């Protein structure tokens, strides 16, 4: 199988090549090729053939191959289903906005957080993604889409703070001057609220945007739809968010999927206002994506809820939905592909 070379930092590559008797600049050369998106050592045309062969004996260049691609007829959103080197599948979404293109990447194969409304968690977590596998999602989507990627959101399958070290290394790689050089301010990371991870991230004072999946401001409701709340309660979560803002000065974005009769009452809007006092938060209201396996239904009070927040001074937007015709949200494609695979095996 070989070592996943695209997960290595420039320093590690340089040291490894030096150990193979190569000059110091060789690391830079190989790093640059990797971040330009080669799929094999043979594409590294300024590296000698004997060295390419030696590298190929120890390292593996590519993990991802495109298993399926869907393009939205409505808005040009592209959804990729990738097969990983071990046969697992993940997905990536490329969204086209006027201000640039955004890639939404996965951070794990599946998820163990168990949110009641989310399709990605239905089969549990299979494994973490490596930094290189996250990077390849960006590089390959950019190459295939034929347009430079300006923004990255870690909002695909998985809980990024449950894969903290690999995510951090991915951020360093994608931010590297010799790599894609995507600025931290163009990266958003979304978490269901793993408080130790939020604290650790705050300590690093990165300039990225933290999104917190709130979905309910009261413990009772939140525990009902998000099991993580039983380990890390919502009041402690708000405290951690205030701490994060005080430390980094970065405004947090709160994700809020509007669910009929569950989290869309006026008192819940008022409670959000109260909990955010002292911190410039932004609430992103998401019309719930209907997941067939779930009894939860989309709220009809999205606009009223938004107005109630706005009237009390909390910025609230309603997320525009892209790729609606290609199930470009919340693990739906992988889920379908898994089911089809199962049906075919059972035939
Ligand atoms: N694990 C991370 C990131 C992945 S989910 C997190 O929880 O934030 C990305 C966002 O989509 C999260 O805000 C998640 O709560 C939301 N989401 C999941 N399923 C959804 C659904 N059916 N409708 C609307 N939003 C959903």
Image: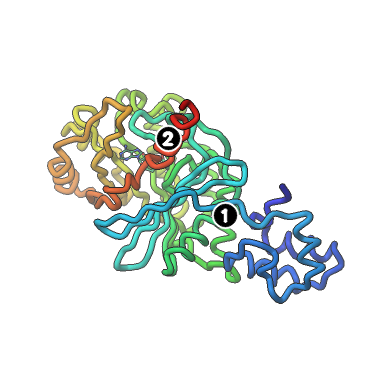
Does ligand 1 reach within 8 Å of label 1's beta carbon? no
> Percent x, y for residue 297?
22, 31
Q: Residue furthest bottom?
A: 46
Secondary structure at numbered mark 1: helix
Residue 87 falls in which quadrant of the image?
top right
Question: Image check: 325 left or right of 154?
Answer: left
> Percent x, y for residue 284?
28, 47
| Of 249 and 298, the residue lying toward us | 298
User: Circles 1 and 2: CB distance less than 8 Å?
Assistant: no
Q: How many other residues sit within 10 Å of disc 2, few (<14), some (14-19) or many (≥20)? A: few
Judging from the image, the colouring scheme is rainbow
| CA gap, disc 1 and disc 2 | 31 Å
User: Image quadrant of ligand 1?
Assistant: top left
Question: Image check: 230 left or right of 308?
Answer: right
Does ligand 1 reach within 8 Å of label 2's beta carbon? no
Number of disc labels: 2
> Percent x, y for residue 13?
73, 62
Secondary structure at numbered mark 2: helix
Q: Which residue is mark 1?
A: 170
Q: Residue drawn 69% across and 67% down?
A: 42
Q: Residue drawn 18% across and 45% down?
A: 306
Q: Of marks 1 and 2, which one's residue comes earlier in the chain?
A: 1
Q: How many other residues sit within 10 Å of disc 1, few (<14), some (14-19) or many (≥20)? A: many
User: Residue 340 has which mark?
Assistant: 2
User: Residue 102 has which mark?
Assistant: none
| Of 36 and 283, the residue lying toward us | 36
Front tag of 1 and 2? 2
Q: Residue drawn 74% across and 73% down?
A: 47
> Percent x, y for residue 137?
51, 55
| Of 152 and 64, the residue lying toward us | 64
Residue 40 falls in which quadrant of the image?
bottom right
């Amino acid at each position: 199988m070989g070592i996943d070379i695209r997960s290595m930092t420039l320093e590690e590559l340089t040291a490894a090549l030096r150990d193979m008797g190569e000059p110091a600049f060789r690391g830079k050369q190989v790093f640059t090729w990797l971040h330009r998106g080669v799929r094999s050592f043979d594409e590294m045309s300024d590296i000698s053939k004997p060295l390419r062969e030696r590298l190929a004996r120890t390292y593996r260049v590519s993990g991802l191959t495109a298993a399926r691609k869907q393009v939205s007829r409505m808005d040009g959103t592209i959804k990729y289903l990738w097969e990983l080197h071990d046969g697992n599948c993940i997905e990536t979404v490329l969204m086209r906005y006027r201000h640039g293109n955004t890639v939404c990447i996965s951070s794990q194969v599946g998820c163990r957080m168990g949110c009641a409304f989310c399709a990605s968690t239905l089969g549990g977590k299979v494994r973490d993604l490596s930094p290189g596998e996250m990077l390849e999602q960006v590089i390959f989507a950019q190459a295939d889409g034929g347009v430079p990627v300006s923004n990255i959101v870690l909002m695909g399958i998985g809980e990024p703070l449950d894969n903290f070290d690999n995510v951090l290394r991915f951020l360093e790689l994608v931010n590297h001057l010799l790599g894609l050089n995507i600025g931290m301010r163009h990266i958003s990371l979304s978490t269901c609220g793993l408080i130790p991870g939020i604290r650790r991230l705050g300590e690093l004072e990165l300039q990225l945007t933290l999104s917190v999946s709130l979905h309910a401001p009261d413990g009772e409701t939140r525990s009902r739809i998000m099991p993580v709340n039983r380990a890390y309660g919502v009041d402690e979560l708000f405290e951690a968010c205030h701490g994060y803002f005080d430390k980094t000065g970065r405004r947090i974005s709160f994700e809020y999927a509007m669910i009929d009769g569950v989290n869309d009452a006026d008192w819940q809007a008022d409670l959000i206002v109260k909990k955010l006092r002292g911190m410039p938060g932004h609430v992103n209201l998401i019309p719930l994506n209907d997941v067939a396996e779930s009894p939860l239904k989309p709220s009809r009070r999205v606009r009223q809820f938004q107005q109630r927040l706005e009237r009390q001074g909390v910025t609230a937007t309603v997320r525009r939905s892209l790729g609606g015709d290609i199930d470009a949200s919340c693990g739906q494609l992988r889920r379908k592909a898994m089911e089809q695979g199962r049906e075919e095996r059972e035939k």
